[in-house]
Amino acid sequence: MPAPTRRALLAGAGALAAMRVLPARAGSPAAHRLVIAPAEVPLVAPGGPDTAVWSYNGGVPGPVIRARQGERLQVEVENHLPVDTTVHWHGVRVPHAMDGVPHLTQAPIPARGGRHLYAFDLPDAGTFWYHPHLLSGEAVGRGLAGALVVEAREPLQVDRDLAWVLQDWRVTREAALAPFGGFHDAAHAGRLGNVVTLNGSAAEAFAVRSRERLRLRLVNASSARVYALEFRELAPLVIATDGHPIEPHAPEGRRVVLGPGQRTDLIVDCLGDPGAVAAVVDHGDPRFAYGLVNLVYDPDPIREEYAPAPTPIAPNPLPAPDLGAAEPLVLRLEGGAMGGLTREMAGRGVAWTLNGLSAHEGHHDHAVLATLRSGRSYRVEIINDTAWRHPMHLHGHVFRVLTRNGVPVARPEWRDTALVEPRERVEIAFVAGEPGDWVVHCHVLEHQGAGMAGLFRIAPA
């Protein structure tokens, strides 16, 4: 696909600036309603031709759902699409029945008027997101994604707390979404778009004020694109990965890398002079870079003196794996173009395997990768024997990333989605949670749909 153009890529200052932190709802559930339906929005340029999409509550991305750690979240979903759907709460440690996997944790929500109520407690603060888990590649590619922000009991003190949802789209010259499907995408890097939006907007600037402190919650809601964001005139600090606190540090190589499904929280201090411009550039595709958004300084500074250093974020109550007693497992990724893809696999519409097994979406019960015991610790070596990147996501759990190619990671890191580079080995560890069948899959959604999905079956202790 051609390089994304700057005009088609960027964040609307007005839309982002208008986002606000909602007050806590002490002692009561956080109740929301999502109506899933077709819509038309101007993706390519402000005021330009509309593109037919699928939406939550009429927009792309869907509304930012905000709740407080420890609250019970209730979301009533009404489906007006022409197809069945579900909602998966990506990264949240939900009960098995709330995981949103069709034919495994729930029946699909029927097309043209079906309803479903999701209700679960929120044990962890952080940045999460929601999306369908039925026809995933097409549904997400048509726009179905939204941020879920769970605020800590003692929120970090910043001037603005903003969710930035990154999506890419493959559109025609007429601004229509290009047809979905095709084995080529599934066997290669997935469906990469030629238009990138930030919070669904195509404006080119985002207004900031000198001496302002931002918390940016970056969400990669693209079905296949990997982002590597460079904040050129700024010095952001990474403070959380996939929703969970990490030792504050500058991004490795000055770039914030986000695989599909991953999230990164940043502290960005806007130290430029009034009237200055600070560029954010994406280097995720090594063939070209493009300007994602310009942070444009308002003439009036927010304050004269710079704010003190932010206080550390409290850790979430995650079960720590016992590394000494952890049972070893191997998850081997195989297949794909320029790799292990065979003619026999292609004939079945399968491009990828996990441990030699493959599963089409909606039939995960046919690919049980391992049987675990609730409460026990496990070390999993993920071996990427393919020529492509794979962001591997484990439902309902959070894991520690231990090593990459045998080298310990620089700092303790908790994730639910690990980006595994070609020919790389990544070791993770976690405590098996609630009994049930939990999906593990590649979050390049075309890879998932072409076989790279399976189950960890967790039995009672």
Image: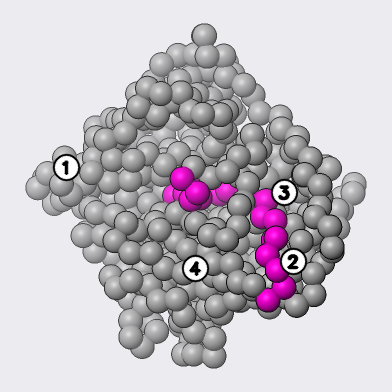
Q: Which quadrant of the structure image shows residue 65?
A: bottom right
Q: Which residue lies furthest to the top in this view?
A: 324
Asked if residue 345 is positioned above or below residue 145 in the image, the reply reads: above
Residue 195 seen in this snapshot: yes
Disc number lying in front (1 or 4): 4
Disc 4 marks a residue whose amino acid type is: Leu
Q: What element carries label 4?
A: strand
Disc 4 to disc 2, C-alpha distance: 20 Å
Q: Which quadrant of the structure image shows residue 64?
A: bottom right
Residue range in magenta is 253-275
Disc 2 marks a residue whose amino acid type is: Ser
Residue underneath mark 1 = 339
| Residue 344 magenta-highlighted | no
Disc 1 to disc 3, C-alpha distance: 40 Å
Disc 4 to disc 3, C-alpha distance: 26 Å
Within 10 Å of disc 2 (Cα), the crowding (few <14, some 14-19, many 20+) is: many
Within 10 Å of disc 1 (Cα), the crowding (few <14, some 14-19, many 20+) is: some
Foreground residue among 292 and 243: 292
N-terminal-most mark, 1 or 3: 3
Asked if residue 370 is positioned above or below residue 323 in the image, the reply reads: below
Residue underneath mark 3 = 150
Within 10 Å of disc 4 (Cα), the crowding (few <14, some 14-19, many 20+) is: many
Q: Is mark 1 on a helix, strand or loop?
A: helix
Disc number lying in front (4 or 2): 2
Disc 2 to disc 1, C-alpha distance: 50 Å
Marking on residue 292: 4
Disc 1 to disc 4, C-alpha distance: 33 Å
Residue at 80% across, 55% down = 306
Q: Which residue lies furthest to the right in this view?
A: 27
